[in-house]
Image: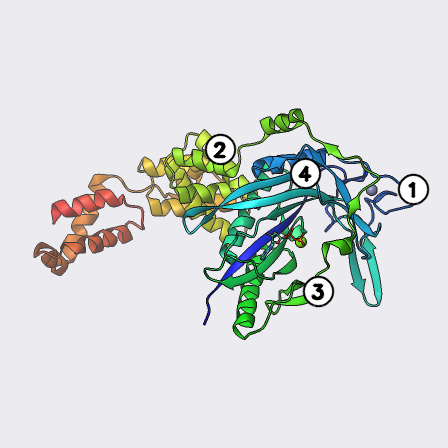
Amino acid sequence: MTEYEPVIGLEVHAELLTESKMFCGCRVVDSTSAEPNTAVCAVCSAQPGVLPVINARAVDYGIMVGLALHCRINEFSQFARKSYFYPDLPKGYQISQYEYPLASDGWLDIEVEGTTKRIGIRRAHLEEDTGKSFHVGDHSLIDLNRAGVPLLEIVSEPELRSAEEAESYARKLRSILVYLGVTHGDMSKGVLRFEANVSVRPVGSDEFNTRTEIKNLNSIRSLVRSVRYEVQRQSDLYEAGGVVIQQTMGFNEATGETVTQRIKEQADDYRYFPEPDLPPVYVNEEWVSHLEAELPELPDAKQERFVELGLSPQDAAVLVADQGVAEYFEAVLAAEGDAKSVANWITGELFRLMNAGGHEIASVKIAPSELVALIGLVDGGTINASTAKDVLAEMFETGQSAQAIVSAKGLAQVNDTAALEAVVMGIIEANPEEVQSYRSGKESLIGWFVGQAMRELRGQGNAQVINQLFREKL
Ligand code: ADP
Ligand code: MG
Ligand code: ZN
């Protein structure tokens, strides 16, 4: 049996968060919630005689993404007509970039099993989104709110070698786009869509085999599932002596299978030609350097900085993956939190609470200074670590301060040595057998003794002091 290696290239479409559409003055609205056809004009509904105008802000955003992905920003780029017929494409063609994209030849570093792998970016080009059609009974309805919304298409080299690498690439790219502020990244609203190009080849081969293209993947989960399925399907096909046919496929979420949509058009079926109604785009150095100077700190740089603060690369990576989480972490540091313990609390207990309730960081009610206060109560010995978890959960629920919860519930731990000593002595007297075993060498019993004392103190004893006392008294 031959072993096959996946070869995967991703095309990512990102709707850009500009105020107006790509070639007209219509507002960009949330196409999942806005009243249909309320952000539509003569241009984006393709009335005769209208002329498109390029949205400069969309070009800015494209350049910013190109820079963040280490691409060359091309001095000359040009829009082209890509002709095809579809009811949600009113002009009968889409304005895209073809021969002369805005940005070319960049790269993106991804983490794969603890090491870094560099994935080439072939190009990033601007285009416009289509409208949406809906089929109700025997009627078809069309909503053109999305028609003409700026899209940036980012195309990778076929250098991803597993579904996991594709996932890592998708997550990293999304994170960069969100940091740049060019999209809010909410995949449930369809603002980021993936297409996976997949082929397989015998391990050791450096040839590129025929690929299939899986369209319209609306979540990272679907991306991963569909790639896995397709890799298996193609491997099985070759193994059985068959051939892979180049085609466009869809992914059936319910069955988890890829399905044929159409046998792929060649590029000339689209009859690409330069858009005669738009001038070419000339981007000079000044334009680029102006935008470069304004780029925010990106995930990789932030992660490096967090590692310099003493975090493990893993913790740093987890904290930077979501821009909101990174901002929260930095706000806690600004409130004088210690980087390592803050990172532990956020990636541990806070994430657990967030995941359990399906909360985003934006809705977390715990003020950064209050997380610092909670950690201070633990460090100062007022409460122990296990009580602190309960307090954090209460803070998460109610937004109350750590101190208020500790006072109201009487959670302060017993630090009074005399009181602790009394408990310790009581336990020693009540358990002569265990005392005997301990003294004859079974020192691991110390944990049992401390546990007994903690139970009596309802979890609020200072474990360290109790441990110390038992060792002395025993
Ligand atoms: P098209 O414009 O027809 O979509 P491209 O050559 O621009 O084709 O490639 C589109 C995507 O397909 C890119 O992401 C590229 O990395 C990927 N790709 C190209 N060849 C292969 C292959 N043999 N196997 C897997 N992916 C491939
Ligand atoms: Mg394609
Ligand atoms: Zn319009």
- Whether residue 417 sits left or right of residue 411 in the image: it is left
Q: Is residue 206 left or right of residue 27?
A: left
Gap between marks 1 and 2, in whole Å? 53 Å
Residue 227 picture quarter: bottom right
Residue, x 77% and y 44% (percent of image)?
80
Question: Residue 22: x percent and y percent?
Answer: 76, 40
Q: Earlier in the sequence, mark 4 or mark 2?
A: 4
Spatial CA span between label 4 and label 1: 27 Å
Circle 1 or circle 2, nearest the eye: 1
**Residue 138: x, y in percent?**
84, 67
The part of the image, by quadrant, that contains residue 217 is bottom right
Depth order, front residue of 184/195: 195
Q: Which mark is residue 216?
A: none
According to the picture, the residue beneath numbered tag 4 turns out to be: 102
x, y percentage for residue 199? 57, 61
Question: Which quadrant of the render holds ligand 3?
Answer: top right
**From the Cβ of disc 3, is ligand 1 less than 8 Å away?**
no
Residue located beneath label 3 in the image: 263
Instruction: Indicate the secondary structure of the residue bearing disc 4.
Output: loop
Query: What whole-number distance in Å separates the C-alpha atoms at marks 2 and 3?
Result: 52 Å
